[in-house]
Image: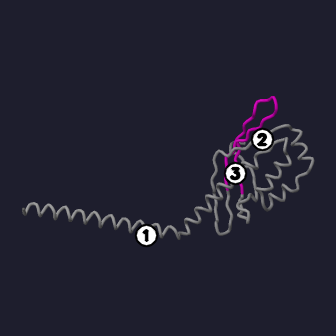
Amino acid sequence: MARRMSWRRVLTGAAVAVVVIAAMFAVRGVLAWISAAGDEDLDTAKARDEALRAGRQHVAELTTMDHEDVEGGLRRWLDVATGPLRSELEDTEPATLSAVEQAGTVATGTVLTAGLSEFNAEAGTATLLASVEVTTARESADPVFARNRYRAQLRHTDDGWKVASFEPIPTGGAS
């Protein structure tokens, strides 16, 4: 009988210990969740992810143009641009648009990889570096593929992230 009592005590003690340990983990988890809910780093990470997502989408848009809808393409470019880039695009000469139409090509940009090299949530600025494959197709000809790298300066506006400047990054190599 004494042996039965000691096993009961051991099992009861073990059960209490398991319950106490589980309660400690639950309390620790709740405290971590409460801490993370008010974490500024979480807001910064969300803003950085949004800048990257928007930047990738905008770079793809800025490297895409269809000769059959040049005005629509230019409107889409203006929608993703702000500041100096938007001003430059607004000043596009009609002769340039006509030349794009006459070229008879469709260029489609696909962002292969992209990342933010700089990000300042408070200032609402970011620098995106992107590797883009541009496929150029012309009727009755095989498509041509070109890989390019671009740097896009992003600005956060009332309408979300927009591209303020957009430039190719030259590839290195011996001259």
Residue 74 horizontal side relative to residue 160, left or right: right
Check if residue 52 falls in the magenta segment: no
Give the mark nearest the N terminus, 3 or 2: 3
Mark 1: secondary structure: helix
Residue 128 placement (x, y as % from top left): 67, 55
Residue 107's label in the rendered image is 2
Task: Residue at 56% x, 69% y: name it.
Answer: 40
Residue 31 - label: 1
Q: Nearer the viewer, mark 1 or mark 2?
A: 1
| Residue 85 tag number | none
Mark 1 and 2 residues: CB-CB less than 8 Å, in contact? no
Q: Main secondary structure of the magenta part?
A: strand
Could you tell me residue 79's position as x and y percent? 78, 56
Quadrant showing the C terminus: top right
Local SS, label 2: strand
Mark 1 residue type = Leu
Say which mark, if any, is on residue 57. Answer: 3
- Label 1 and label 3: CA atoms lie apart by 37 Å
Give the foreground label among 1 and 3.
Answer: 1
> Given the image, on which type of amino acid does mark 2 rest?
Ala
Disc 3 marks a residue whose amino acid type is: Gln
- Nearest the camera: 73 or 164? 73
Q: Are marks 3 and 2 in contact (CB under 8 Å)?
A: no
| The one of 84 and 43 positioned closer to us in this rendering | 43
Point out the tag, 1 or 3, that comes first from the N-terminus: 1
Boundaries of the magenta span: 128-152
